[in-house]
Amino acid sequence: MAENILSGVRPTGNLHLGHYCGMIKQLVDLQNNGEYNEFLVMIADTQALTDNAKNVDKVKNNVVQVAIDFISAGLDPNKATIFIQSQVPQLFEMTGYFLNLVTVSRLKRNPTIKEEIKQRGFENSIPAGFLTYPVSQAADILTFDATIIPVGDDQNPLVEQTREIAQAFNTTYSPIFKLPKAVIRNQSVCARLPGTDGKLKMSKSAGNGIYLCDDESTVKQKIMNAYTDPDHIKVSDPGKIEGNVVFAYLDAFCKEEHFAKYLPEYKNLDELKAHYKRGGLGDVKVKLFLNNIIQEILTPIRKKRAELEENIDAVYEMLFNNAKKLRKMADKKITELHEAIGINYEKFKK
Ligand code: TRP
């Protein structure tokens, strides 16, 4: 039987090239070539609120933006059901029952949570909702009987914990949950696309991202200012490829056909890299080449975005309709859950 696929993202900012090359490409590929019954993509606003309780604007304003990013970058609303987490309140009910099957110490041992607590400085005061978001993520997955979870490797411990919760439920009550598996994105350069500053992964908080919604001149400016090799001062100097953001992006996005089109003096990336390492190739030339490639990718995405932005209400309508369908699906699972636990009181009446 065909399976249900579920992926999700927290709406705390617009999507950038790191998302495009990692998450979105994987989802679009699955959408077009995978076998599935339901293909669900969650905009996880309630999860985003677990560490943004006082930053509601940051979350709520990005919900429709993320939907627009997804669709303009290739998710097809006829195949992918994109929806807002808070519009399926049954997920909270599911979470409530699951919380009884998990210990606080197990949650504190979850490597993803551990890392995120450190990043956020929550060591001495962890919001309870934040500590337990893996349980709510288990509910996201299990409520919709999703078995295929395409995610980055940082999410693996969350899927692992979901499996434990499903197993605990199945053995404590009755086996109504299938065990999901994470489909980890390939660990190519896309998995950790560096920011334009060369320091960290591309991210909103680091302010080092190239966004799908950036206009042409913004993108060009970001590329022209991107971190390369600080010791490559004169064109004739030999240059370093490692840690050089421009080459990291070329590794991720450049194809051989781009050379014929934009830089015919070279056959492929190996030749370009060899010249750079030897010396005699300036950063500006490589950056302009990269700019051509990135603009080629982003131009159709921008065009689609402009169309969607003309009619934002239609995007909201789509999200609301999808949530309606998923509430029905969730209601069925909640009924199953009540029966499994034995609190289906209607059946008690003689
Ligand atoms: N934790 C994911 C993130 O940080 C978002 C998410 C929420 C998710 N629910 C999910 C991912 C269910 C996969 C499945 O981006």
Image (cartoon, grey):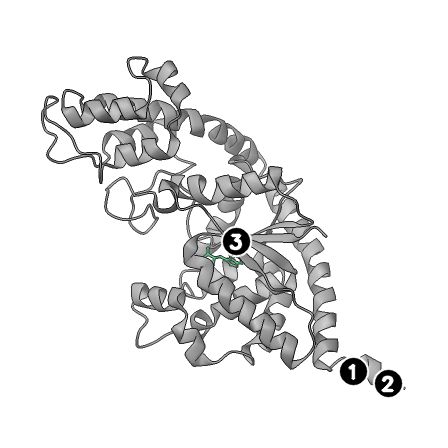
Residue behind label 1 places its C-beta within 8 angstroms of ligand 1: no
> Quick check: 20 above or below 340?
above
**Mark 1 or 3, nearer chain start:** 3
The residue depicted at 47 percent of the width and 30 percent of the height is 302
Can residue 89 be seen here? The reply is no
Q: CA distance from mark 1 to mark 3?
A: 34 Å
Figure quadrant of the C terminus: bottom right
* Horizontal and vertical percent position of residue 178: 64, 64
**Pointers 2 and 3 in contact (C-beta within 8 Å):** no
> Quick check: 147 above or below 30?
below
Residue labelled with disc 3: 8
Residue labelled with disc 2: 349
Q: CA distance from mark 1 to mark 2?
A: 7 Å
Residue labelled with disc 1: 345
> Quick check: 280 above or below 32?
above
**Pointers 1 and 2 in contact (C-beta within 8 Å):** yes
Near mark 1 (Cα within 10 A), the count class, few <14, some 14-19 or many ≥20, is few
Residue behind label 3 places its C-beta within 8 angstroms of ligand 1: yes
The residue depicted at 44 percent of the width and 52 percent of the height is 152
Residue behind label 2 places its C-beta within 8 angstroms of ligand 1: no
Q: Amino acid at mark 2?
A: Lys
- Between 275 and 28, the residue placed more toward the observer is 275
Near mark 3 (Cα within 10 A), the count class, few <14, some 14-19 or many ≥20, is many
* Horizontal and vertical percent position of residue 36: 66, 47
Q: Secondary structure at mark 2?
A: loop
Q: CA distance from mark 2 to mark 3?
A: 41 Å
- Occupied quadrant, residue 232: top left
> Quick check: 84 above or below 32?
below
Q: Amino acid at mark 3?
A: Gly
- Between 287 and 184, the residue placed more toward the observer is 184
